[in-house]
Amino acid sequence: MGESNHMKKINQFLEEKMKYIGSLESVLDIGGGTRFTKWLKKYKHYFNDDSYKTFDFDASTNPDFVGDIHNIDLEDNYFEAIICSSVLEHVEDPIQAVKEMYRILKPKGVLFCYIPSIYPYHVKKGHYRDYWRFFDDTVDLLFKDFKDKEVLKFGGYFKALSFFFPFQHKFRFILNPVAEFLDKVFKTNSRTTTAGYYIFVKK
């Protein structure tokens, strides 16, 4: 079936935003674990290692800064950009976490965030728990103090359902095109139900 138009749009969005963020002089990756893990590794070539820093409460990931996202021990207006991917569902107070990220961003600084919506429970025992899921109204609430907000949903109804398929991580090569085809046929991408949100906002 090939890559759907929806996924092409998401990949173009990621490419564009990571290229822009990578060009900035101070970038903080919050809660991403070790440097350039998972999906971010694909865009490592856009970043200068000296300008890219990591922040995590788990010292075993060897972050540049160890701390609590609810009370970040950094000055106001400190970074030009923040990346916070698949983190807010694991923190006790996501509203406070976003307020802290807003505080340490420089004026006109940008935040790139991914948060899940309809998605399975996932934890790493001894490292983090799983507290929250988010919806359109939550996105509006969490990022209400930011401007120039861009939001892309990660698929529609069938994409969200595909993550509940047993051993789904082993069958993504089948599940992805089928779910994306069904979302297109039934036009579910324009509805509320989604697997998650890609968010890009400016202070």
Image (cartoon, grey):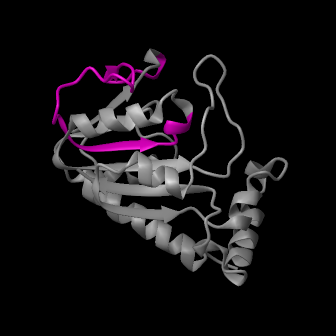
Residue 26 place in picture, x, y as percent: 20, 40
From the viewer's perspective, is 163 left or right of 20? right
- Along the line of sight, which residue is nearer the eye, 109 or 165? 109
Residue 166 place in picture, x, y as percent: 85, 48
The span picked out in magenta is 60-89
- Along the line of sight, which residue is nearer the eye, 113 or 43? 113
Q: Is residue 48 above or below residue 175?
A: above
**Magenta region includes residue 195:** no
Q: Residue at x 62, y 26 (%)?
A: 129
From the viewer's perspective, is 160 left or right of 96? right
Give the residue furthest to the bottom.
Answer: 185
Q: Residue at x 47, y 19 (%)?
A: 58
Q: Quadrant of the N terminus?
A: bottom right
Residue 27 place in picture, x, y as percent: 26, 41
Residue 173 quadrant: bottom right
From the viewer's perspective, is 78 left or right of 1? left
Residue 172 quadrant: bottom right
Q: Is residue 61 above or below residue 197?
A: above
